[in-house]
Amino acid sequence: MKITLLGTGTSVGIPSLGQLGWGKCNPENPKNSRQRCSVLIQSNNTNILIDAGPDIKNQLINHDLDGLNAIIITHEHADHISGLDELRPFYFPKKEKINIYTIERTATFLLNRFDYLFKKNEKSQSYFKPPMSLNVLSYYDEINLNGIKIKTIKQHHGAIDTIGLIINDKFAYCTDVVDFPEDSFNKLRNLDTLVVTGLRSTPHIAHAHFDLTFSWIKELKPKKAYLTHLSPDSDHDTVLSLCPKNVEPAYDNMFFNI
């Protein structure tokens, strides 16, 4: 199974618009160019996407995918959902609806914001067919998508909770998290690979900062860990110099096999 981290940046990306720009990141290092967080999971003829932010077309265009078997949405913040409309072309060839999986709160939000993707309404053009179908998950669910086993956990993300994902009991993806319920945290122990938020050096109300993330990794003991959702304060080489031996900052289009 191939895991590709399509995007590893915070909600504004790096560089951002306006005066923030590259922040403290060296623009000469291509690993500092970060789009919004998304992950592609590929196994045999199965393609599963985690999150679909505003960069998703650019992130997928060179992967030559024939289709998407499922999209899992971790939560409803714009940097994780605002590219959903871009994925409509995967519906066109066979007219098979694209399955979206998420928790009930986020599903309700998507139905309100992207109602036309899920149901026909009186303002739709006559030729338009809703290309997507919503599937509601609960925290601590387990689903099997063409042999890929996916477990959900609850994560605290400031004012809301988000979904963390454990794939085939070997790989976990935990973006947009500042704290874990004990039940969730214990399910992350002794994995092969952990990808987890590491926003910046200083604390944040909704995202783990480096020292907090490093303390989690020390206790959880994955064989390898990568930081994602990095901010413009977080230059790749600077962060790498801060990381413990088995930890690295992730970067866009980095991939590994599990």
Image (spheres, rainbow, N blue to C red):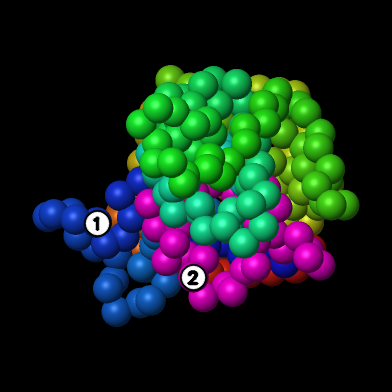
Residue 19 image point, x, y percent = 12, 55
Mark whose residue sits in front, 2 or 1:
2
Residue 191 appears in the picture as rendered: no
Q: Residue at x 51, y 54 (%)?
A: 87
Q: Residue at x 63, y 46 (%)?
A: 98
Relative to 81, say whether 64 is above or below: below
Q: Residue at x 39, y 62 (%)?
A: 34
Q: Earlier in the sequence, mark 2 or mark 1?
A: 1
Q: Residue at x 44, y 28 (%)?
A: 121
- Residue, disc 1: 16
Q: Residue furthest right?
A: 147
Residue 30 image point, x, y percent = 38, 76
Label ID, residue 61: 2
Residue 119 image point, x, y percent = 52, 31
- Return the residue nearer the eye: 217 or 43: 43
Range of magenta residues: 41-70
Residue 67 appears in the picture as rendered: yes
